[in-house]
Image (cartoon, helix red, strand yellow):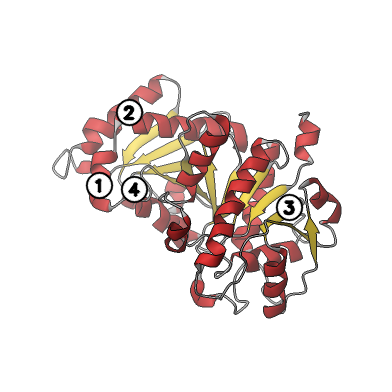
Amino acid sequence: MAENEESSLPIAVTIGDPSGIGPEVIMKAWYKRKEFTLSPFFVIGSVKLIQQQASLLNLDIPVSNITRPSQAVHVFASTLPVLDLGLGDDFEFGIPTLDTAKMVIASIDKAVELIISGKARAMATAPIHKAALYEAGFKSPGHTEYLAELSEKFTGEEYHPVMMLASEELCVVPLTIHVALKDVPGLISHKLLIKTIGTIHSSMQKYFNLPNPSIAVSGLNPHSGENNSMGNEDSEIIAPAIEALKKQGVRVTGPMPADTMFHKAARDKYDVALCTYHDQALIPIKTIDFDAGVNVTLGLPIVRTSPDHGTALNIAGKCLANPTSMINSLLLADRMSKNLPPVEFETEIDQDE
């Protein structure tokens, strides 16, 4: 497919769990499409459900029932395009149900299929509620891992997915993701570090126009082990991997004490921070920019972004959800799939409409 043809394809947006705020932030993003010059996107899910939620939330959102992604480009300016899956769509705000779980999973499956088959160019996923999906056959620890499984199913190749959280102020990657803290030390290996840092390096080059990205790696233990007095993982596993990558020309530093990596002066010295476990990475970015951050999956044959927040069941149905992260997700998906200049993240969006 020619580059200009691929760039004209719409972005697929999965509906997320309808008991949460996913459909709401999607609709609010469409409502502000002109304000933020959003490229055409379409929702994969249920026309009836979107219409019902728009009515319940008092949102003036006209909907078009499309049968193929290409139609989204033509109707996006005046209506929100929805590709209906014909699956269960009865929902209750704040209470995830099995009835919609199959649709939530099917929307993710369909988005990957459409991108790999060349009918959409990227995907932005609304938040899912994993506990509610397990009964419907969802077995992966999270979105990231499931997308890797789907990509392997459709292409026959093996992938090493990397979850990156991105905002205007900070980009972070957790080396280990959805695992118990007690299991983290045993999972950190030379091979995992080499593969993950390699994926970060190549992805920042490919999608973010950084020819020689700078990557900072945190230590696992306090003060990076304090000369092995608080563990030897930093000196015996992390440091040697960093040195090996430096010899290959990768700009990587560490292991750095995690407690001094995230103040402003420190952040200015690197493009991405690689942290050893989930909370070590997510606490700083959610503290710095809770509403505007974007979850990006690197290392797959598709471009995937997502709001850096969950289903927020406690505010579902109240029309209080902030669409900033979803809007940033769409902007970043657009930029990455077109290899555009750096996107300017929105940090605050008026909630009056």
Which one is in front in this view, the residue at disc 4 or the one at disc 3? 3
Helix, strand or loop at disc 4?
A: loop
Residue 341 visible in this rendered orientation of the protein: no
Label 4 Cα neighbours within 10 Å, binned few <14 / some 14-19 / many ≥20: many
Residue 185 appears in the rendering: yes
Residue 346 found in image quarter: bottom right
> In the displayed structure, would residue 90 be above or below residue 69?
below
Which residue matches tag 2?
A: 241
Report the residue marked by disc 4: 277
Instruction: Estimate the spatial distance between the alpha carbons at disc 2 and disc 4, rounded to whole Å.
Output: 17 Å
Dot placed on the residue nearer the N-terminal end, 1 or 4: 1
Which amino acid type corresponds to the residue marked 4 in the rendered image? Tyr
Q: Quadrant of residue 351?
A: bottom right
Left or right: where 252 falls relative to 39: left
- For the residue labelled by badge 1, is the local secondary structure a helix, a strand or a loop? helix
Residue on which the image places disc 3:
41
- Mark 3 surroundings within 10 Å by alpha-carbon count, few (fewer than 14), some (14 through 19), many (20 or more): many
Between circles 2 and 1, the one closer to the viewer is 1
- Pick whichever, 151 or 314, lies toward us: 151
- Taking the spot 17% from the left edge, 42% from the top edge, the residue there is 231
- Give me the C-alpha separation between circle 3 and circle 1: 40 Å
Distance between mark 3 and mark 2 Cα atoms: 41 Å
Disc 2 on helix, strand or loop? helix
Circle 1 residue: 183
Mark 3 or mark 1: name the one nearer the start of the chain. 3
Mark 2 and mark 1: span between their CA atoms? 20 Å
Residue 9: quarter of image: top right
For mark 3, give the secondary structure.
strand
